[in-house]
Structures are given as C-alpha cells and as structure tokens.
C-alpha cells in the first residue's frame, strides 16, 4: 500500500508542482519531448499506484509492471548524472551518483512488497 501511495503521489507531482524538475531527468535524446515524457510517465505512475491500492488481487502482476517501470525510468537518472543536470536538490555529481544506487532498491521494493519475486521463486522451484 505504501508503494502505491508513493507512486500515485510522485505521479501527481509529474503533472503539477514538480513537472520542471522531472523534465530535467528526461534523457537528452528525448529532450524535444520532455514535457510529454513527464506527463506520460506521471500518468503511468498514477495508474500503477492506484492499481496497487485498489487492485490488490493483481498485486503480483502490477508488482512486475512497477519493477519494469523503475528500470525504464532509470535511464533518466543515468542521464541526469552523466549530463550533470541539477534537479530535486541533486546539485553535485556525488549526489546524483548516490541516487543511482537507490534505483535497484526501488525495484526490489516493488518485487518484494507485492510478492512478485517470491511468486516467481516458488514457480521455479
């Protein structure tokens, strides 16, 4: 549930108060479409968050989608680091690099808290 609320909250930020900050993370190859990328990813984040909250019966499937989403947006975090873009208070290479280390934890949170990983492990064993 906490992950669902966190995703929905972040998604709303994509559409409102943090829109410019999120645009700073869009990889340079998509820079011309930064606003669209931020709006689209925000909508996806809201849907995933609401899905985790309201569709608990499908938490395993949604957990995999959230994990994949976190992997997909990791490219933006890497771009922010490589291009030295300040956003969300990450105003040094060190701060941007440390943030990269937390992305695998988000993937683990998504797969662990929804039972996606344990379901996969049981099906393999």
Image (cartoon, rainbow, N blue to C red):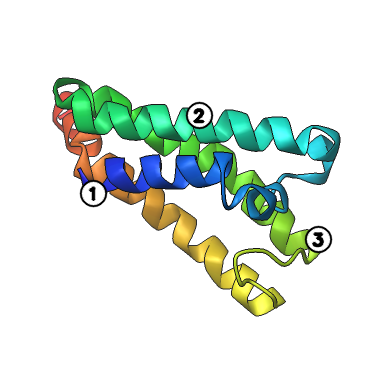
Left or right of residue 59: residue 45 = right
Between the C-alphas of marks 2 and 1, the distance is 18 Å
Q: Quadrant where the N terminus lies?
A: top left
Answer whether labels 1 and 3 touch (C-beta < 8 Å).
no
Mark 1 and mark 3 lie on one chain; the one further toward the N terminus is 1
* Residue in the picture at 61% in, 72% down: 89
Q: Which residue is mark 1?
A: 2
Q: Which residue is mark 3?
A: 83
**Residue 86 vs residue 16, the one in the foreground:** 16
Q: Position of residue 45 (x, y in %)?
A: 45, 35
Left or right of residue 103: residue 55 = left
Label 2 packing within 10 angstroms: few (<14), some (14-19), many (20+): some
Q: Position of residue 41 (x, y in %)?
A: 56, 33
Say the numbered circle drawn on residue 43.
2
Label 1 packing within 10 angstroms: few (<14), some (14-19), many (20+): few
| Helix, strand or loop for disc 3 | helix
Q: Position of residue 118 (x, y in %)?
A: 17, 37
Label 3 packing within 10 angstroms: few (<14), some (14-19), many (20+): some
């Amino acid at each position: 549930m906490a992950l669902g609320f966190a995703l929905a909250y972040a998604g709303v930020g994509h559409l409102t108060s943090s829109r410019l900050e999120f645009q700073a993370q869009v990889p340079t190859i998509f820079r011309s479409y930064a606003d669209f990328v931020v709006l689209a990813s925000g909508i996806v984040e809201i849907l995933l968050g609401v899905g985790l909250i309201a569709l608990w019966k499908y938490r395993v499937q949604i957990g995999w989608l959230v994990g994949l989403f976190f992997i997909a947006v990791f490219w933006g975090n890497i771009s922010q680091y490589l291009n030295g873009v300040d956003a969300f208070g990450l105003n040094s290479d060190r701060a941007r690099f440390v943030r990269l280390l937390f992305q695998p934890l988000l993937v683990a949170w998504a797969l662990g808290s929804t039972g996606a990983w344990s379901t996969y492990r049981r099906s393999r064993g």
